[in-house]
Image: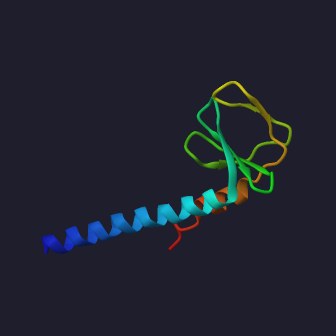
Amino acid sequence: MNSRITSLFAAVVLSTLASGAFASDSLANNVDKTYRLKDGGTVFVFKDGKLAMADKFDRAIHVSKGQVVETADGQKISMTSSESARLDFLQRQGHEN
C-alpha cells in the first residue's frame, strides 16, 4: 500500500510540474518583453504592444491607464493599457485540467 501512495504522489507532482510548463510556455509565446519592478512586481509587454502587470507574488493586477511604475533599475514606465484578464488567463492555462 505504501508504494501505491508513493507512486500516486509522484504522479501528482509530475503532473503539476508539466502543467506549469504549459502555462509558462503559453505566456512566453505571447509576451515580447518583461520588466522587473522595484516593488518586486513585473510588467509584461505583449507582442501586440499592450501591457499587463503582476504583483510580487505573480498575480495579475489591474492598473490605471497612465499609472507610472518604476523598474528595478530606475526606469519609469507609463502604463498605456491594463491587460490583467489576459495575463491572468495565460497564467492559468494548463492549471485547469
Residue 3's place in the image compared with 46, above or below, is below
Q: Quadrant of the N terminus?
A: bottom left
Q: How is the image coloured?
A: rainbow
Residue 43 place in picture, x, y as percent: 69, 42
At x 81%, y 41%, the residue is 79
Residue 42 place in picture, x, y as percent: 64, 41
Q: Is residue 67 left or right of 94 when viewed as pictured?
A: right
At x 57%, y 46%, the residue is 58
Q: Is residue 49 left or right of 23 when viewed as pictured?
A: right
Choose between 96 and 70: the one closer to the eye: 70
Residue 46's place in the image compared with 9, above or below, is above
Q: How many marks?
A: 0
Q: Quadrant of residue 39?
A: top right
Residue 64 place in picture, x, y as percent: 81, 42
At x 50%, y 74%, the residue is 97
Q: Quadrant of residue 24?
A: bottom right
Q: Quadrant of residue 54?
A: top right
At x 63%, y 28%, the residue is 72
Furthest residue in direction top, as rendered: 74
Residue 81 place in picture, x, y as percent: 82, 48
Residue 14's place in the image compared with 58, above or below, is below
